[in-house]
Image (tube, rainbow, N blue to C red):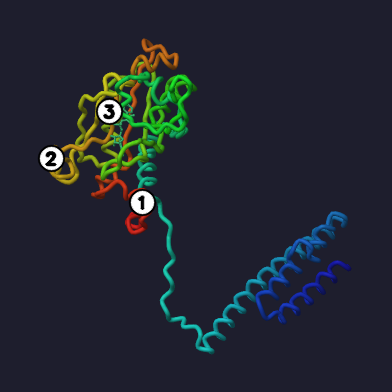
Amino acid sequence: MDIKKDLEELKNRALEQLKDVDDDQGLEKWRVFYLGKKSPLNQVLRGLASLPIEERRLVGAMSNDLKLLFESNVEQKRLSLYSSAVTTLQEKGRLDVTLPGRPVAQGRLHPTTRIVRQICDIFSAMGFQVVEGPEVETDYYNFEALNIPKDHPARDMWDTFWIDRKDENGERTTLLRTHTSPMQIRVMEKTTPPIRVVVPGKVYRYEATDATHESMFYQVEGLAVDKGVTFGDLKGCLYEFARRLFGPERKARFRCDYFPFVEPGVEMAIDCFVCAGKGCRLCSNTGWIEILGAGMVHPDVLRHVNYDPDVYTGFAFGMGVERIPILRYGIEDIRLFYGNDLRFLRQF
Ligand code: FA5
């Protein structure tokens, strides 16, 4: 059979030529010629369809064996070229294989990314879906729909980066979101309850920075809406979260707080890691550290998205992410997070 003979000849010719290859370029040329798309072997494989069935099977198997043989020979040759290059360098005294290797710089996750993932994992395990939203927002989503109309004094709680010019009425509408709460509205507009979501993301505030305040930081928002959701659900969910994130020995405390988009509103604090509630510098001698704001979604907010507050109720919460590693690792200044100082980042 001619093809069989041809393949045998091809094998002998190729292996003979490979013996003469003495550098990497030569080896690459050989590989492209004998194993590339236009190789004689590939041409045989392409012509298989025109052969009678018996011959097709035989030639197909032979071609595949030959391909495998070529591939293993290329690898062997590569290794032998490499080891003879090393030997040559050693003989010339230019290579000392006993020197310690150069350390390979390994990438790692930013401390904020780690903690955001941890928080989202905990809520995912409780049945919450993770969603994200835009950082450039409108006045409507960031304030109006959250029950904070223009000229409401609560707007002072969120110093705002406006990013458009004033219109003819002296008003602006586009801003960098000051919190992740606008996503409460965006999610409710698009979804029919039951809703359970967490929203991680960057937020921006036009305020002077100091050891505990940045102008850009991360928040994680949470929202649960359904028939019959109660304040007890809010507390149960957030207690469980605190236990899973900080450990079962940590205590959590709720106290009244005010946010225009919830009623009632609360802040949640956990007992201080450092002094276990006795009072220290970290907790400003209170024994407690505030980690999030929360509350029952305000009926007016539900009305804004056409939910009937007599049918649906819900709870929402929002936490500052950096505060958690600050407490855990005793980091003294929030500005270290985004200063890009590798000496800081490499510690995590
Ligand atoms: C809010 O932003 C509300 N949206 C939270 C909320 C959501 C309440 C849902 C009720 C229901 P506040 O302004 O307190 O709330 O910010 C929340 C957290 O962000 C704070 O507890 C704090 O940990 C963090 N934070 C606030 N300002 C800064 C800042 N400048 N730098 C770093 N973290 C900050």
Task: Kindly identify which residue carries mark 3.
Answer: 236
Q: Nearer the viewer, mark 3 or mark 2?
A: 2
Tag of residue 339: 1
Q: Quadrant of residue 221?
A: top left
Residue ID at (42%, 31%):
162
The quarter of the rendered structure image containing the N terminus is: bottom right
Residue 225, horizontal then vertical, whole percent:
38, 21
Seen from the viewer's position, the closer of residues 224 and 48 is 224
Q: Quadrant of residue 171?
A: top left
Secondary structure, mark 2, is loop
Q: Is mark 2 within 8 Å of ligand 1?
A: no
Q: Is mark 1 within 8 Å of ligand 1?
A: no
Residue at the outermost left position: 278
Secondary structure, mark 3, is helix
Q: Which circle's residue, 2 or 1, is located before the other in the chain?
A: 2
Q: Is mark 3 within 8 Å of ligand 1?
A: no
Residue at the outermost top position: 310
The quarter of the rendered structure image containing the C terminus is: bottom left
Question: Mark 2: few, some, or many residues within 10 Å (few <14, many ≥20)?
Answer: some
Seen from the viewer's position, the closer of residues 324 and 338 is 338
Q: Quadrant of residue 74?
A: bottom right
> Tag 3: residue type?
Gly
Taking the image in four quarters, ligand 1 sits in the one at top left
Secondary structure, mark 1, is loop
Residue 145, horizontal then vertical, whole percent:
41, 20
Question: Mark 3: few, some, or many residues within 10 Å (few <14, many ≥20)?
Answer: few
Residue ID at (57%, 80%):
83
Residue 255, horizontal then vertical, whole percent:
20, 27
Lateral position of residue 51 relative to residue 113, left or right: right
In whole angstroms, how far apart are the C-alphas of marks 3 and 2? 27 Å
In whole angstroms, how far apart are the C-alphas of marks 2 and 1? 29 Å
Task: Kindly identify which residue carries mark 2.
Answer: 285
